[in-house]
Image (tube, grey):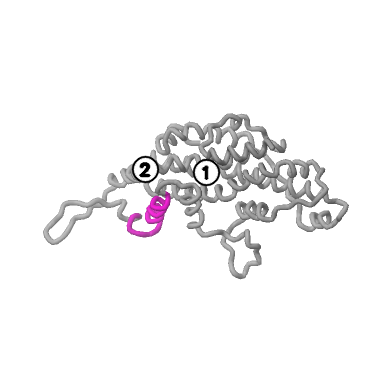
Amino acid sequence: MVDDSLVVKVFGEIASEYLPCAKDIISKVDGQSYFFMDTAPFEEIAFDADRISETNQIYWTELLGRTHLAATTSIQRNLSWIEGAARSYEDDNFLSFAANLRGLIESVGDAMEVLVPSARFIAKHHSAIKSAVQSKLETIFISDDFEKSLIHYSHARRVKKSDDAPEEHKAKQTFHYINILAENAAIPAIKPMYADLCSIMHPAAMSVLCFVENGDDRENGVEWRNSPSAYTFRAQDLRGQYEETLPYLVFQAFDPAFITLRALHRFEMFPQLSGLKNFSFRLRSLIENVDSDLRK
């Protein structure tokens, strides 16, 4: 892992609050396993009117497992992008820096889309869900939308027209996630930042001209010079341009997962994460709504 000081250098002091908790969570869930029953044996149980409580138990145990998996993998994935950005910034690797930031933005949008509503859902319905996983719920309780959102998070991919795949397996366009960050999360300058990162990553002008600097104007023209030394300052320029945006990416990268994991404590199925008990979340509305519902 990258030293935290390098991440703070790029993303600001807010990173010093989030990184220790993220790393602690990753260490504590190492080896966590999840079991998902095949469709055929589950349907045998689900269509048996005398096994409703068992159906609920299997269904909600699996959905809580999917929720935990989504939260923990989003932490690991976002941390990897963040550390990759910090490492490449320190190495003056402009293209790698841009690639890591672009990956981070898309990853944060993806995680926010699934985890913000997941935290709210399991908090709002925690009593029924807990009865279900304890095999005490005798009326069928399912949530098709919740289930599909979790499946999309883990299984989305580019699906060919000839593929027989469910809708939730189809990957969404990247602009969908950028809109989430711009409109729902209100991250400042996220759209122009993402556009700039794309222009750097594509085989286009910025991926070439980042290695070039202008020389002296000459009669009837201008001089260009191949300049590796100019390239080393590009990452600094990019960071400076979006210095206000970067801290937002840190707490949006982790708060939805942290809050979801804290809500999952209610079910006593996964490792208890003491670092989340008094953590200072930036998504105040989300944590207040979740905590309020969990008290009901």
Q: Quadrant of residue 67?
A: top right
Classify 25 as above or below 216. Answer: above
Q: Is residue 127 left or right of residue 288?
A: right
* Closer to us: 48 or 186: 186
Which image quadrant is residue 85 in? top left
The x, y position of residue 217, in whole percent, is 15, 54
200 within the magenta span? yes
Which class describes the residues within 10 Å of circle 2: few (<14), some (14-19), or many (20+)?
Answer: some
Q: Position of residue 221 (x, y in %)?
A: 16, 60
Q: Which residue is mark 2?
A: 239
Main secondary-structure element of the magenta-colored stretch: helix
The residue that disc 1 covers is 78
Residue 245 lies in the magenta stretch: no
Residue type, mark 1 in image: Asn
Mark 1 neighbour density, 10 Å: few (under 14) some (14–19) many (20 or more): many
Query: Dividing the image into 4 quarters, which one contains the C terminus?
Result: top right
**Numbered range of the magenta stretch:** 190-206
Residue 6 falls left or right of residue 278: left
